[in-house]
Image (cartoon, rainbow, N blue to C red):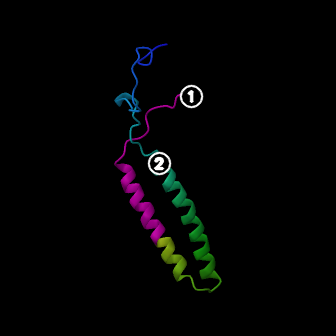
Amino acid sequence: MKGAAADGERNQGLVRSEHRRARSGEDFDIIIGFLGFWALVLLAVTVWMEVTAQPALGWALGLLALLAAIYGMVRLRRRLPARTATRKN
């Protein structure tokens, strides 16, 4: 056996500093994509409600809130580094 286990040492569940996952924007990208999909759905519903002369204020306010959330997520995403490490299988 190689490594620390061969020497009789245990890591006690601790993660070595070189094995820690660097914070990247990948999780933010997933959330932004999810919110973007629902923004498109709400846009289509809002337009349909307007065209058919039905009340669309609630749908439009929901769309506005979703767009504000996407804007905030994009601003937070810009502060994080891009993913540079590759996954090992």
Query: Residue at 56% across / 70% down in the picture?
Result: 43
Q: Is residue 88 rendered magenta in the image? A: yes
Q: Secondary structure at mark 2?
A: helix
Q: Vertically, is 82 above or below 49? A: above
Query: Residue at 43% across / 46% down in the picture?
Result: 25
Query: Residue at 61% across / 74% down in the picture?
Result: 45
Where on the picture, by quarter, is residue 85? Answer: top left
The kind of residue on which mark 1 rests is Asn
Is there a contact, CB below 8 Å, between mark 1 and mark 2? no
Report the magenta residues as a range. 65-89
Q: From the image, which quarter does the C terminus lie in?
A: top right
Q: Nearer the viewer, residue 63 or 10?
A: 10
Residue tagged by mark 1? Answer: 89
- Residue 29: x and y in percent read 48, 50
Packing grade of label 1 (10 A; few <14, some 14-19, many >=20) is few
In space, the residues marked 1 and 2 are separated at their CA atoms by 20 Å
- Residue 26: x and y in percent read 47, 45
Q: Vertically, is 22 above or below 47? A: above
Packing grade of label 2 (10 A; few <14, some 14-19, many >=20) is few
Residue tagged by mark 2? Answer: 27
